[in-house]
Amino acid sequence: MPGNLVIIPTYNEKENIAKIIDAIFSLEVDFDILVIDDNSPDGTGDIVRELKKRYKNLNLIQRKDKLGLGTAYITGFKWAIERAYDIIYEMDADFSHNPDDLKRLYITSMDGVDLAIGSRYISGVNVVNWPLGRVLMSYMASIYVRIITGMKIKDTTAGFKAYKREVLETIDLDNIRSRGYAFQIEMKFTTWKFGFKIKEIPIIFTERQEGASKMSGGIFNEALWGVMRMKWRSFFRNYKRENKS
C-alpha cells in the first residue's frame, strides 16, 4: 500500500545518485523513490535504470530536456497523487540533505503536520561549507520573502520537505508559475494561504562534496521578482478549501 515517496530531481548527479538511493533504502522507515532525470549527459539516468533491477521501489522518469526544478517536482507530485502516496518528500541528490532526516520529516508529518520543512534557519544558521556571501544571500532572501508575503516560515527557500497528499491535491499544481528555485517559495506560500499546518524542524545543510552546484545569481533574481508577482496574483485568487464529505 503506497505510503512515503521521495522525489529526487537530477541533472548530472552520477557521483551521488547511487549512494543517495542506497542510503534511503537502508533507513528503518520504508520509502519509495522517484528519480526525475532531465536527460543528464553524464549517464545519471542509466545508473538509476541499473539500480531498478535491485530495488523494486525505485522509479525513474527521464525527460528529454533540462526543464527545470519546478516542472520536475510538479511532474513527480502528479505521479504521486495518481498512485495515492500518503506523504510526498522533496530531496536533493547531492547529500546536502541528510537521508537520516527523512525519518524526522516522517515523524513530524505523522504528528498532524501537513507540510514539514527541514529548515536551515529555525535554530540559528545551520549551513556547512557555504561561503559567507552565499549564506547571507540565502538568509536575507528568506527575510525578504517573509516581509513580502507575511509568512512566518524562517527558511522560505528550503528544498527538503514533506507534503501530505491532501496539500498537493488542494493546490492547483498547473497554476504554480515559478519554475526555478522560486518554485519552493511559491509552494510554501500557496500551502500557507490554504491554511494547512506547517512546521519547521532544524536540519544541518551541508554543501555538496561531489558534482557541480546548480546555484547561480540568476536564480536569486528570479526569486526576487517572482515573489512580487506571486504576492500580486494572490490578491485575485480564492484560497478556500473544499469540504470533503
Image (cartoon, rainbow, N blue to C red):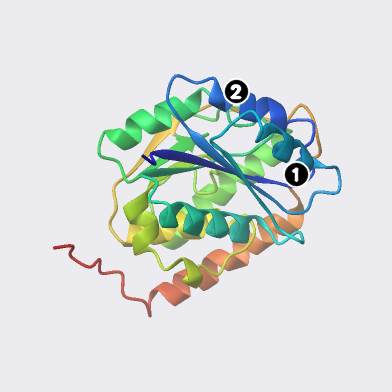
Identify the mark at residue 23; answer none if there is no mark.
2
What x and y, as percent, mark residue 153? 41, 46
On screen, residue 204 above or below 34: above
Mark 1 crowd level (few <14, some 14–19, many ≥20, 10 Å Cα): many
Q: Which residue is mark 1?
A: 45
Q: Secondary structure at mark 2?
A: helix
Residue at point 39%, 64% (across, down): 171
Say how many tags the image has.
2
- Front residue of 211/150: it is 211
The mark lying in front, picked from 1 and 2, is 1
- Graded by Cα atoms within 10 Å as few (under 14), some (14 to 19) or many (20 or more), the crowding at tag 2 reads some
Q: Is 233 in front, or is 24?
A: 24
**Residue at the extreme front:** 53
Measured as percent of width and height from the top left, residue 103 is found at 43, 26
The x, y position of residue 184, in whole percent, is 53, 53
Place residue 126 in its image quadrant: top right
Mark 1 or mark 2: name the one nearer the start of the chain. Answer: 2
Residue 66 in sight from this viewpoint: yes
For the point 86% across and 48% down, the residue is 41
